[in-house]
Amino acid sequence: MQADGIDAFLEMQAAERGAALNTLAAYARDLADMTAVLHAGGVTARTAGEADLRAYLAGLAGQGLAARTQARRLSCLKQYFLFLAREGMRPDNPAALLEAPRLDTPLPRFLSEGEVEALLAACTPEADATPARQRRLLVARAALEMLYASGLRISELLALPRRALDAAPGMMLVRGKGGRERMVPMSARAREAARALMEADAARWSPFLFPGRGVTRPMTRQGFDRILHDVALRAGLDPARLSPHVLRHSFATHLLAHGADLRALQVLLGHADIATTQIYTHVMLDRLREAVADHHPLSHAGEREVG
């Protein structure tokens, strides 16, 4: 596999691009699958032509792989063969002209503003709740307030150190994908909920704002999912409709609905490319139609003539 330059490609992705371990593992699987198919046909990554790669991609479609999976594989191949060409491991890039299958972009799932308020209200502990139950609801309250107020990814939230609250007033320092840091706003409600959790955890100090069972490690995604499931039931919502990413979508959707700028939203979400943020433009369509109906000089022409 070293002869095909895969190890060197993965090292470059880790060192220069800051690729996450999961991303590197996915690239390794995709490239191993491709090279196995190419070798079965008597060619290697260094000798394969565009026709060989098209045949490989056609095989993926024939296996019934989703268009999104095919597109992800192609993205990996394009980066890999570009790397081989730049490093002089082959004279050309056979993947340069390959096109991804058309993707039907699903609209992001989000909650209504009333449903978010119901979730937050469900985090209020009962008077007779046990200490463990009270802490569980404090965790839920702090996490939900911060996810909804800042649009954080769940990985970003759970990795937050306690010192994240020490940033400028009303702001929080977050380390996102690829190790990129950004400042995000933190509402007074979210800060208050986080402080309440820290006070409850004073006796079991941890470097993390959301510690796991062992205080030296952050809470796991699975542990948080269980808490979210319980809160959804308390709020009368279907747990299947709720996930940390749905809260992130809700943050973005509600922000745009109240007049936020798409560029500002891109910064808040930590998207490297505004094309990723544009999945939320569905929210803006009604506003654009209303703007034309209310303010375009010709939209009321018929009414003036009748009058």
Image (spheres, rainbow, N blue to C red):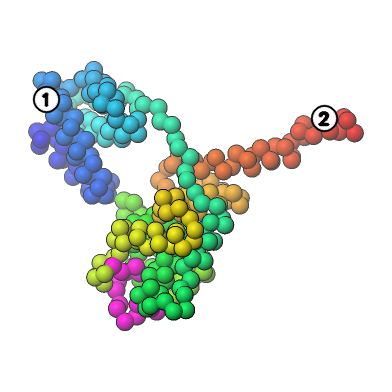
Return the residue found at the far bottom.
Answer: 203
- Spot occupied by residue 207 in the image (x, y as percentages of width and height): 30, 71
- Residue at position x 30%, y 58% in the image: 222
In depth, the one of 281 and 124 nearer the eye is 124
Q: What amino acid does circle 1 point to?
A: His
Are there few (<14), some (14-19), or many (20+) residues within 10 Å of tag 1? few
Does 54 sit left or right of 130 as displayed? left
Above or below, 76 against 150 in this view is: above
Please say whether residue 209 is one of the residues in the magenta stretch: yes
Q: Mark 1 points at which residue?
A: 39
State the extent of the magenta-drawn residues as a range: 198-212
Where, by quadrant of the figure, is residue 70 drawn? top left
| 222 lies above or below 210 | above
Find the distance from the CA under tag 1 to the CA under tag 2: 69 Å
Kindly identify which residue carries mark 2: 302
Q: Which of 202 and 95 is in front in this view?
A: 202
Residue at image x 87%, y 29%? 305
Question: Please, what is the three-letter code of the amino acid marked with disc 2?
Answer: Gly
**Circle 1 SS class:** helix
Quadrant holding the N terminus: top left
Q: Residue 205: x and y, percent?
A: 30, 77
